[in-house]
Image: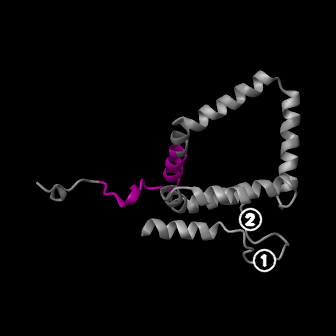
Amino acid sequence: AGDGRVSTELDTALTLEERGGTAADGQPAEAQLGMAIQRVCFLLPGYVKDLCSYLQPVLRTVADLVQMVHDIFTWQHELSPTVALGLVAVALLFEVLHFSTVMMVIGSLVLLALSPIMTFAVGLVSYLRWWATSPDGEQLWKMKASYDPAWSCT
């Protein structure tokens, strides 16, 4: 019973009806699936439709991100000029530097980003900031300076 309900809801959601007309900027309110995709989704087994309905928030986020990237590269987003200037700057930098230098820098940045050094650096900066702002050696997290044996549960 639950399998049929989800399948029916997904089939209904995959129809090609116009939903909501167009937005104020002239864009469709929601992108529609093509007829081939609609037919494939209609033939999918129930467990795949259940999985799709379970992952719908994640899929919606990915779809929104892909739509934003599409809008940026088709000059329909306010970040388009900034991204274009950034791509031109990167292209000029790649033109000036040797390919091996570029690969070494990219590899070093990837290793740095994925290593525990970043965690160490962030922790060290946080500790130094705390140490610099606590003049009397004030204990972090309201810790006591001395230990009281009454706190032990022996």
Residue at x-position 73% and y-position 60%: 35
Residue at x-position 31% and y-position 57%: 144
Disc 2 marks which residue?
31
Label 1 neighbourhood size at 10 Å, few (<14), some (14-19), many (20+)? few
Q: Main secondary structure of the magenta part?
A: helix
Identify the amino acid type marked 1.
Answer: Gly
Identify the amino acid type marked 2.
Answer: Ala
Disc 1 marks which residue?
21
Of residues 9 and 30, the one drawn nearer to the viewer in this rendering: 9
Q: How far is mark 2 from mark 1, CA to CA? A: 11 Å
Secondary structure, mark 2, is: loop
Is the image coloured rainbow, by chain, by secondary structure, or in one colour?
one colour
Residue at x-position 52% and y-position 47%: 128
Horizontal side of residue 97 vs 6, given as left or right: right
Residue at x-position 84% and y-position 31%: 94
Question: Per the image, is 90 magenta?
Answer: no
Of residues 42 and 71, the one drawn nearer to the viewer in this rendering: 42
In the image, residue 28 above or below residue 132 = below
The magenta stretch is 123-145
